[in-house]
Amino acid sequence: MKNSLKLSPDQTGYFGEYGGQIIPPALKPIFDEIAVAYKNAQADPNFRAEYESLLKNYVGRPSPLYYARNLSEKLGGAKIYFKREDLNHTGAHKINHTLGEALLAKRMGKTKLLAETGAGQHGVALATAAALVGLACEIHMGEIDIVKQHPNVIRMQLLGAKVVTVKSGGRCLKDAVDSAFEAFVKDPQNIFFGIGSVVGPHPFPMMVRDFQSIVGKETRVQILEQAGRLPDYLVACVGGGSNAIGLFHEFLDDRDVKMIGVEPSGRSFKPGDHAATLTLGRPGNIHGMFTYLLQDDKGQPLPVHSIASGLDYPGVGPVHSDLKDKGRVTYETINDAEALEAFQVLTKIEGIIPALESSHAVAQAIKLAPKLNSDKIIIVNLSGRGDKDVDYVAERLKL
Ligand SMILES: *Cc1c(COP(=O)(O)O)cnc(C)c1O
């Protein structure tokens, strides 16, 4: 299709006005090398076969598409289906792209995967892929996050990763990004920087999108099988935006399928209290890309907050900035309290404990469904499971 929205980005990594490689000239060859290697890998049937075989036999794909009858009937409106990414090995969608990155790194002759992590979810998914593919792994993590997310630190260590404690600045995610990037540029010949979402310099927003697009491809087949038609709405939470575009991509040219990305409005709409980038931000530069950004007057990223640490990011993948401007996807917000409520509703009514990130998408569906007729279909991407969140939720609810 000539005007297909699926054709982005262009050769230089732009989704409309957004994306690119906003990096020092000395680093450009490193990312260009990855872009070329990725293109070659994509064209190699052996690479694809190995990746697809791992998705099937290691991750457990295809993940089910589940019709939530209890929840739909209680709400009394549209039928709600869940794409069960929570049932993947390691409990979320992230394994879909970390495996792809690990296979590509190995093919390029790299010896080590390196990344930062905030809550540790990306670190665990990358360390898992490194263990499987046979690469060393180094994860940078802020000192404060290391204390808060101790079980994930242990997991990474058991998986053979070296966890580097970052003691500079605020000792959180942003400082871990800086520290990891510094370590990477010291030895880009041997290290592959494993970015955790559809963010960063080209080709990462495209590459991670491609690896995640399996979610929407399966969903299309499954809903046609189960309902005999395409859905009316797709709903997914947006941190960097990888699980959302993973679901959306396959449907971008089906204009009757509406799409809603859900951002966290946290405690309030005041700066520092939320991470509603597309709702309240404006375009700027962050982490090697041009995209919507929550920023101060000087263009510096603002502090962010969400009850779901995986959504706690002041930027967003450039593909979402473009889809917002083009009006193809609508971006809404859900706050901490609404997400926590949806977490409990889904757990009690369907026996599924969702990640707090995914709970934002669930909350949006709970708002939307009663306004629609029962012949309408909403598909929600259940990006991850909530096992990691139960201690925190117990504390909040004083259980
Ligand atoms: C990391 C994470 C997210 C947010 O990342 P995206 O790139 O926006 O998908 C959402 N859900 C879960 C379960 C996560 O672990």
Image: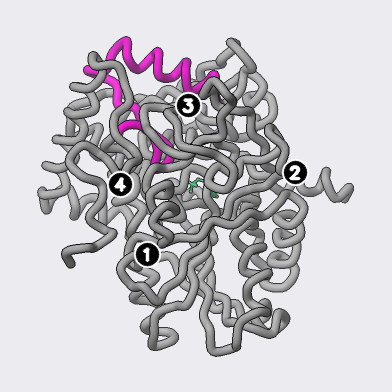
For residue 107, which numbered disc appears in the image? Answer: none
Please name the amino acid that badge 4 sits on: Gly
* Label 3: which secondary element: strand
2 or 3: tag closer to the N-terminus: 3
Q: Is the residue indicated by label 1 positioned so its CB lies within 8 Å of ligand 1?
A: no
Which of disc 2 and disc 1 is earlier in sequence? 1
**What is the magenta range?**
174-201
Q: Disc 3 designates what residue?
A: 116
For label 3, the crowd category at 10 Å Cα-Cα, with few meaning under 14, some 14 to 19 and many 20 or more, is many
Question: Alpha-carbon distance for marks 4 and 2?
Answer: 31 Å
Which residue matches tag 4?
A: 16
Q: Residues within 10 Å of mark 2 (few under 14, many from 20)?
A: some
Say what amino acid the circle numbered 2 marks.
Ser
Which residue type does callout 3 highlight? Glu
Q: How far is mark 1 from mark 3, CA to CA?
A: 27 Å
Task: Say which amino acid is labelled 1.
Answer: Gly
Residue 216 has which mark? 1
Q: Counting residues from the N terminus, which is met first, the one under dot 1 or under dot 4?
A: 4
Q: Are marks 1 and 3 in contact (CB under 8 Å)?
A: no
Image height of 259 relative to 373, above or below: above
Mark 4 near mark 2, Cβ–Cβ under 8 Å? no
The residue positioned 42% from the left and 27% from the top of the image is 287
